[in-house]
Image (cartoon, helix red, strand yellow):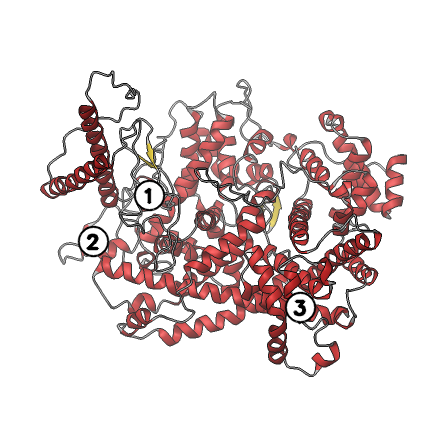
Amino acid sequence: MPPKSPRKGALSRPQEEERGPTEPTGIESDDPVLSSLCNQLNISKLVKVQTWQTYKRFSSDRSLQDNMKKIESLGLCLYIAAVNADEMTFTFTEFVKAVDISVSKCFNLLRQMDVNMDNLSTKVDSAVMKLKKKYETMSHLYQKFQSTFNDIFLNQPNTGNAAGSRYKAILEGSWTTYLLAKGNVLQKDDDLIISFQLLLCVLEYFIKRSPSDVLKEPYKSSVSGLSVNGPTRTSRRGQSRNTRTSRQSETDTRIIEALCKANECPVDEVKNVYFSSFVDFLDSTGISSMDGLPKAEVISKQYEGVYQRNKDIDARLFLKNDPSLKVDISESLEQERTPKKNIAGEAPVIPPQTPVRAAMNTINQLMVTLNSSCDEPSEILNLYFENCTINPKIKITERVNCLGQVFKARFATAIGQACAEIGYQRYRVGVRLHYRVLESILKAEEERLSIHNFSILLNNDIFHTCLLACAVEVVMAAYGGNSFQTQSQAETAVSFPWILNVFEQKAIDFYKVIESFIRAEPSLTKHMIKHLERCEHMIMESLAWQSDSPLFDLIRQTRDREESIDHPEMASAAQQPSQNNPTAADLYLSPSRTTQQSAGTSVPTSSSTNGQGPAPPQPQQRSTSLSLFYKKVYRLAYLRLNSLCSSLLSEHPELEQIVWTLFQHTLQHEYELMRDRHLDQIMMCSMYGICKAKNIDLRFKTIVTAYKQLTNTNQETFKHVLIRDGRHDSIIVFYNLVFMQRLKSNILQYASTRPPTLSPIPQIPRSPYRFANSPLRIPGGNNIYVSPLKSPYKSSDGLLSPTKMTPRTRILVSIGESFGSSEKFQKINQMLSSAERPSKRTAQDGTAPKPLKKLRFDDHDEADGSKTLSTDSKFQQKLAEMTSTRTRLQRQKSEESSNGVTKEEH
């Protein structure tokens, strides 16, 4: 909503009045509804008092009270109080049952209650997000379980009660066993892919022990000849893991392979989950010693203990279609459909992307890419190593092996000890990607610099560790199911920046490798690129500004060197033109911590040459790292500010550049304010301060409400801001006690008759992370775009790429006319082929091409040929237009390759 009319107010006056009413200090209420809830859920007296205090505070908001029943509002206040007090005497399912609401409605009401930034603590936010993620994960997995189960087992409702009871027993037994297995194996976090692979393991176990007359093909024929019970628990005790794996793989492979084929799941990964985790689960729960199918009551009793310990959702209720677990299909779940067979002349039916299917597709694409890669250095890499002054091979391979053991242990700690081998398998996939990208980077550097000795770069430990971390992060993101994270935006235990902590690397060092990594691996999917771009944004927003970051030392060193320079590097970074996109080698060889001599800046000085003629290129590159970082920070900061201003200051567009000037000034001169804080915190304070100075009535509550609508925001950003000495409070307290105190004189200048000079708006180029399928705009083409062919073609190296086509596989399309005869197509090909030679000569001679006619789509030839032009004339005109379009595209491609990043078209 736009701000109200201008009002006057003292700039330095504390803003505590906007924090909302303080909590009452009254005694507990004898409200019968609250008393009944407390008795049902065994609530302590302390939590009951806090519940009533919270309820009285929320009661002042009539809009909230009108949208929910009294028992709902009291119940939600009770849940908030219990979480804040760390006194969870009830499970989440028991809670929603007592309040008589569904899980999804509970989440929606909690979101409505958080209209004020001080209502819900970060502890409550975290607890709700974890529950929401678990709920959505289980909803999707149960949906997948239903479809897979129905593909395996026959439901015979008309053959008598015995058959129906048997089907129901298998259904309930397999789902409850799966819940128990999931709770035992994934003790710390719900990994979507491991959860689904465990589901296949449980179904395989039940297939082997079910009567053949209830099975469908191919599972019915797969179980014939198999040992039903397999080795007993006693016989397993005398076997080593290798012997046990070998013996079981001989009998279990057919069913597992059939399940994996039907669900497009890697067989080796499911086998790994089965033998490294699922077999131990069967032994630890006593299921392996049971004859036939596991007893449902025994399994259910064991799951009850897991459910009560976690205090979360009773997923057994999915079997009963319980109202408390009802979901909004249109909003949260997409029903999975089987694609129909293609009918001649019709487009194929594409099924909707469920989270499991999307994650499996991403993993399969990654495996296709790495099909020819190895987890050891290739022959080409070994040649690069041998060309170095100091061969880095031993050091590199030892580091990879050492970090592998560290990763394995940390993954097991984060997900569950039973998942250690699964984590190590993912790490080895990351190692393959790491070596592949390293080879690609070295080839590009060799072509760019015409050198063969990369000893300095290849012996840089930080470069190798960050490159490996980036590769492993891509693999972790693929297995994490990026499409699913859009549902709840909840982070997992192994989400970025977890990998930085595992490898003990600084965020600013990891940032240096991201862009080169993306450019070096063209097969990365759009989701993978988006994920790495989001990692880069997180680094620029907060991670690079942590207290232990080397960024602050680098800034201080740069400022000391630039005190006598009129246009310091950080000040001019936003306006510097892009220079051929610095590579990882440029950034890692640029000073990051200490330096012995002055680095070059955007304005060279005579002192940098030391009287030895023109300065060599190396000193100028030595400040590339900080310059590029600040350039990207400014662009990101302005884009977010622009989005916020569009929402809040549409009636005062002139304020945007003023707010940006204060924002940019703070980042450049008061960068210590960013220490252990977030970029968006400085942005919101800058907007509030300028509006106060300009007497624009814009409250922090309004700013925060609009801020929550931006992409990739977190409530902790405005609820949990560092004040000083480890103390945190809301964004308002930070503004009053820290931001305004530091920048008061600067803010007041904007209220004077001689305000400071405004900072220029940063140049916003097209994103360097171009996607393979992004449309290309035709210059002067009146909003005409050309998109690459979307149908993938497999090439010899296994990559899916539309560029690996031959002339026979290319399709020529005419717009606005059906040519009909093959002779006309031959004329088109001849004319287009002859058009390539003049365009090449023009580029070589440097002669400007003649102006091209615009494509016209308004005139179409009529079938009876009644137009003024003859058929041949129209045909020649059409050929000329197509030729000019092709020449235009070739010229645009040539210009873009020479100019680097161009300004984005809007």
How far apart marks 1 and 3 lie (CA) works out to 71 Å
Of marks 3 and 2, the one in the foreground: 3
For marks 1 and 3 on the same chain, the one whose residue lies earlier in the sequence: 3
x%, y% of residue 675?
Answer: 49, 49
Pointer 3 residue: 224
- Look at the numbered disc 1 and give the secondary structure of its residue: helix
Which numbered circle lies on residue 499? none
Q: Nearer the viewer, residue 396 or 462?
A: 396
Left or right: 797 with respect to 614? right
For marks 1 and 2 on the same chain, the one whose residue lies earlier in the sequence: 1
Pointer 2 residue: 607
x%, y% of residue 143?
Answer: 66, 48
Left or right: 326 with respect to 520? right
- Contact between marks 1 and 3 (CB within 8 A): the answer is no
Q: Nearer the viewer, residue 541 or 557?
A: 541
Pointer 1 residue: 573
